[in-house]
Image: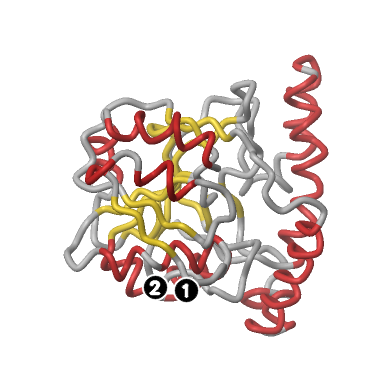
């Protein structure tokens, strides 16, 4: 991520954030050197071991002793919105708010089909396959958009419709590349499960839901995701391993029929 940090960090410094932290997960390139090159404007937190992106994000709790709105960003993004700190204060509208996910775009400016989604379950697995297939067709073939939306509206109701203008809405989980959370809420939720190296957002989203917190998707803060690959071929195995872990942790019945129904209960 070192090469993109040279571009991303000046963008962040121009925004007027109170503090900027680099959470380094024992990187093997010169990311730490690049970050430290910005001097005291950037606080670098170096991990002694590589624990994965979720566990790495938890390190912010040790660094922030006071209440704050935390804006988590992946290192391989480009920030597209100006005056983010001011907008962040508008995004977190109550103490009952869990996570708020911003808009994430592909390199070509299209919405990614995974900005948010329903609770992890068999239902999610099935509808995710439909979202992947139809979402791609919608983006590449505009003439098909109306027909596809009609055919798949019920199945994809809890996934983004990338052919329409994004709007703020309550969601079960939001993508981790660009999201906001109050420090107190993040601590209350318990952060991320460090045992997961994929599907990071599913577990804290479920815990937030059980605590009665409502999470949102809000497109007013946008980033472009450059998708720098640091996992290679091992990512597919990691995704499968994470899915099995989530099923064991929450119970096969919960995955098969969450809340006793095929379609999962949803925050409103």
> How many badges with numbers are in the image?
2
Q: Residue 97 sits in which quadrant?
A: bottom left
Q: Residue 166, percent across and down?
A: 51, 31
Q: Quadrant of the N terminus?
A: top right
Q: Residue 233, percent across and down?
A: 82, 53
**Res. 189 mark:** 2
Q: Which residue is mark 1?
A: 207
Q: Residue 142 sits in which quadrant?
A: top right
Q: Closer to the camera, 179 or 113? A: 179
Tell me if label 1 and label 2 are in contact, CB under 8 Å: yes
Q: Residue at x 63, y 44 (%)?
A: 114
104 on left or right of 231: left
What scheme was used to colour the molecule? secondary structure
Q: Residue 159 sits in which quadrant?
A: top right
Secondary structure at numbered mark 2: helix
Disc 2 packing (10 Å; few <14; some 14–19; many ≥20): many
Q: Residue 254, percent across and down?
A: 67, 79
Q: Residue at x 81, y 49 (%)?
A: 129
Q: Is residue 132 above or below residue 197?
A: above
First in sequence, mark 1 or 2: give its number.
Answer: 2
Q: Is residue 235 above or below residue 220?
A: below
Secondary structure at numbered mark 1: helix
Q: Residue at x 71, y 53 (%)?
A: 231
Q: Closer to the camera, 189 or 213? A: 189
Q: Residue 67, percent across and down?
A: 19, 62
Disc 1 packing (10 Å; few <14; some 14–19; many ≥20): some
Which residue is at the far top? Answer: 143
200 on left or right of 188: right
């Amino acid at each position: 991520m070192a090469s993109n940090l040279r571009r991303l960090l000046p963008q962040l410094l121009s925004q007027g954030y109170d503090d900027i932290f680099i959470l380094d997960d024992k990187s093997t390139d010169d990311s730490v050197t690049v970050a430290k090159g910005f001097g005291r404007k950037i606080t670098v937190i170096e991990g002694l071991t590589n624990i994965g992106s979720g566990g790495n994000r938890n390190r912010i709790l040790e660094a922030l002793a006071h209440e704050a709105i935390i804006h988590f960003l992946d290192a391989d993004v480009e920030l597209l919105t100006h005056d983010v700190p001011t907008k962040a204060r508008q995004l977190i509208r109550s103490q009952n708010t869990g996570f708020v996910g911003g808009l994430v775009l592909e390199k070509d400016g299209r919405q990614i089909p995974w900005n948010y989604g329903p609770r992890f379950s068999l239902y999610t697995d099935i509808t995710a396959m439909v979202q992947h297939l139809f979402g791609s067709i919608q983006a590449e073939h505009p003439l098909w958009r109306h027909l596809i939306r009609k055919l798949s509206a019920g199945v994809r109701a809890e996934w983004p419709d990338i052919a329409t203008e994004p709007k703020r809405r309550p969601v079960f989980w939001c993508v981790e590349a660009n999201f906001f959370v109050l420090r107190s809420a993040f601590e209350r939720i318990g952060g991320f499960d460090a045992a997961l190296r994929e599907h990071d957002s599913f577990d804290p989203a479920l815990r937030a839901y059980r605590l009665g917190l409502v999470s949102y998707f809000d497109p007013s803060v946008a980033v472009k995701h450059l998708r720098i690959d640091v996992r290679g071929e091992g990512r597919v195995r990691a995704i499968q391993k994470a899915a099995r872990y989530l099923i064991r942790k929450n119970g096969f019945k919960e995955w098969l029929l969450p809340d006793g129904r095929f379609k999962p209960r949803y925050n409103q």
